[in-house]
Image: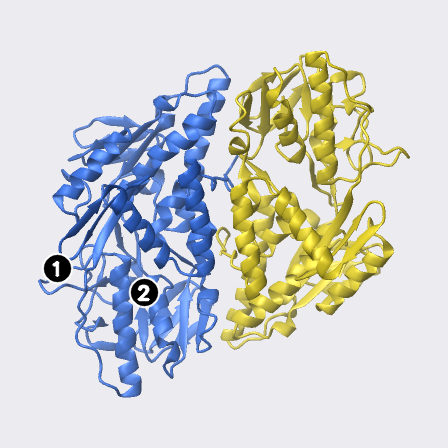
Chain colours: A yellow, B blue
Amino acid sequence: VVLGAGFGGLNVAKDLADVPVDVVVVDANNFHTFQPLLYQVATAGLGPDDIAQPVRRILRRHRSVDVVLGRVDSIDLEARSVHTAEGVALTYDHLVVAVGAVTADYGIPGVNEHALGLKTLPDAVRVRNHILNCFEEANRIALRGGQPDPALLTFVVVGGGPTGVEVAGELAEVRRAILAKEFRDIDASGARLVLVEAADHLLRAFHPRLRERARRALVARGVEVRLGTAIEQISEGGVVLAGGEELPARTLIWAAGVRAHPLGSSLVGELTADGRVPVDEHLCLPGRPEVRVIGDLAAARDRRGRLLPQLAPVAIQEAHHVAASITSEVTGRPGPKPFQYRDRGIMATIGRSEAVAQFRPNVRLSGFLGWVAWLGLHLIELIGFRNRANVLVNWAWNYLTYDRGARLILENGR
Amino acid sequence: VVLGAGFGGLNVAKDLADVPVDVVVVDANNFHTFQPLLYQVATAGLGPDDIAQPVRRILRRHRSVDVVLGRVDSIDLEARSVHTAEGVALTYDHLVVAVGAVTADYGIPGVNEHALGLKTLPDAVRVRNHILNCFEEANRIALRGGQPDPALLTFVVVGGGPTGVEVAGELAEVRRAILAKEFRDIDASGARLVLVEAADHLLRAFHPRLRERARRALVARGVEVRLGTAIEQISEGGVVLAGGEELPARTLIWAAGVRAHPLGSSLVGELTADGRVPVDEHLCLPGRPEVRVIGDLAAARDRRGRLLPQLAPVAIQEAHHVAASITSEVTGRPGPKPFQYRDRGIMATIGRSEAVAQFRPNVRLSGFLGWVAWLGLHLIELIGFRNRANVLVNWAWNYLTYDRGARLILENGR
């Protein structure tokens, strides 16, 4: 039984498809989300269907793999069974838990109520709807002869990691491509984009030269980058920064980080500070070799004892490892060596023709070259030919025309 | 002021873009929906973004055209002003009302509560979610060792017009492509598709030979076609047919017809039986030459006095007419002759490589040829290059692989 159809769970299922075992994948959604591109949906560059694929379709050729749409309600480690909220009970010989992470609020008041997360596909659609509705409301106020509250066109992104940088960069494109070109009654220069980060630099995981490059690229696009700025509280009217300064804003996008899925607490008593489940060198639950934990939920460590980052490549490599180790148990072939993450590099895009990337051991790219590397890698990785072709069409179109077509306000209380 | 951004309203705005007038288009959605392909979204052949375009983008090059996202609350014919629910007030010299039609329940009890309409993009997404959730629920019941209630996999389509025929035909494809291939625990042959029509033939507007061809094509695809069968009532558990027979079904798709938008009653006291607004030979409100009504809301008639059908080509031709007549008033050039609809033909698709089409004066196509004609025409008509390319990619992929990728269950209580 594999819990979760993210990068981790899907790769386990695929690897086990040719092994004489029955696999059941359980996920609360009927689709896999290509999370690295969520920010593109949030900023209307791609439609939701472009970055998601039905789980059943991804696995359809693998006859030994079944899929259950359901929310995991409980795991009984003694009875070796999983129960979903919909009443499905599954017993297992091997369990792989790959349920990922959720938005972390770090205990800051108001985050859940007033900030927009960006961790799921519905999150991204909600951000898109919200931004577009702010534009429309400002336009209506101007048409009524009024002066829009500046907060209505102030967009604050909290968190200077890759997601925050990518959203802030794309918001600058949205301001230029949509707001300036299509809203006749408001002045796009009145729209304010702010990126707030508690550390004194962006992109912690990157080389200092690339961090600074990213910062300058954002500033050049008209984003106010506030470093060394912690958040004290979030209200409906805006953000209160540490020190008491208030930043009135109708839109607050929370990209400050994630914590492991709460299901971890049903596996083990003691979790890491960010909610992850400690695992041994083969990613098994200590004392439970039949239960494996991978991806954002797993507290796997590198050789120096540092927690591995919560990134898709880590989840994918862990998936291959546990699939190999289950295969060895089933077939009697020798198992893999202890898990070790091979860091091939990281990248983040800032906007049109601008990205930063660093590869092991010592290659750093930025600007157009970085962007081409980023684009190529993401296209290759997008699961499924159809999505790839669609995404290519959309991106080529967006690039050539400065256009963003995927911006239907489809669901909300308007 | 143009109310509505459907085929009618958009074409009025485009035609008036080069005339020295200011145009404001008001719509409750920020997107135009290509309604003839709604059934494709409902059956997971295309994603919502594929058949919709932002209104602002469609009109962005036309500097004299402004757009307001808003719901029309009232029209003051004396003061020549329109008010939206959001508080925007617009005064006009000329008003074009093109707000279209809504689902008609014909007074049959339970339609609003228990049937799924198919007139808007959210409607189509709701149908898609509902169908896919039924499959998933049946699969879970089977996994729990139970026997799914046959109603869970019974899909009833009411209405034998083009929409009903197209949905029923595509449901047969969905059964074959998704249910049979990807749900390991249920037997697709247990799924039942029923098309119910009160008249004793399908596709009333078509030649009897094509009606029969469509019926046979549906039956060949495993659809039960129930002609001469009226509906008495709809409940949560299914449909009660005239005569008392009950048809238990969890899914009821209502494609039985539309009535004009209720805004018509604020224009004139006396409406036609299906809620349309009587207009004169130039599509003006009688006695109010500055108010024009077009599209599904207008009770325009042909030379024999018959009401024109509520179809996109009618709305488009009417749009060109009223734009020409407004242009003539503004510029002093001679105006157009009284409006006359040129019927170029109608078509409906039944499924993979099967459609019926008839063109004036006497060309009838069916089967693969009809389908190619249908496909070509719809691709050409889809507004905007980007959507066209995406749709082409999706359709080519679907055709070659029998696949349907656009089936994310995105919004609902699961």
Please give the residue where the numbered disc 1 appears in the rendered image: B306
Residue A119 against residue B142 in the figure, above or below: below
Please tell me which residue lies in front, B375 or B25.
B375
Q: Amino acid at mark 2?
A: Gly
Relative placement, left or right, of A207 versus B354 is right
In the rendering, at what x and y percent does residue A351 appear? 67, 60
Q: Chain of mark 1?
A: B
Residue sitting at x 36%, y 78%: B92
Give the quadrant of the N terminus of chain B.
bottom left
Relative placement, left or right, of A372 versus B177 is right
Please tell me which residue lies in front, A323 or B116.
A323
| Displayed quadrant of residue A230 | bottom right
Please give the residue where the numbered disc 2 appears in the rendered image: B8
Report whether residue B374 is seen: yes
Residues at marks 1 and 2 touching, judged by CB atoms closer than 8 Å: no
Residue A109 numbered mark, or none: none
In the rendering, at what x and y percent does residue B250 appear? 36, 30
Residue sitting at x 62%, y 47%: A379
Relative placement, left or right, of B352 versus B184 is left
| Displayed quadrant of residue B305 | bottom left
CA distance separating discs 1 and 2:
20 Å
Q: Chain of mark 2?
A: B
Of helix, strand and loop, which one carries label 1?
loop
**N-terminal-most mark, 1 or 2:** 2
In the rendering, at what x and y percent does residue A121 appear? 58, 45
Q: Amino acid at mark 1?
A: Arg
**Label 2 neighbourhood size at 10 Å, few (<14), some (14-19), many (20+)?**
many
Same chain? Circles 1 and 2: yes
Relative placement, left or right, of A187 versus A301 is left
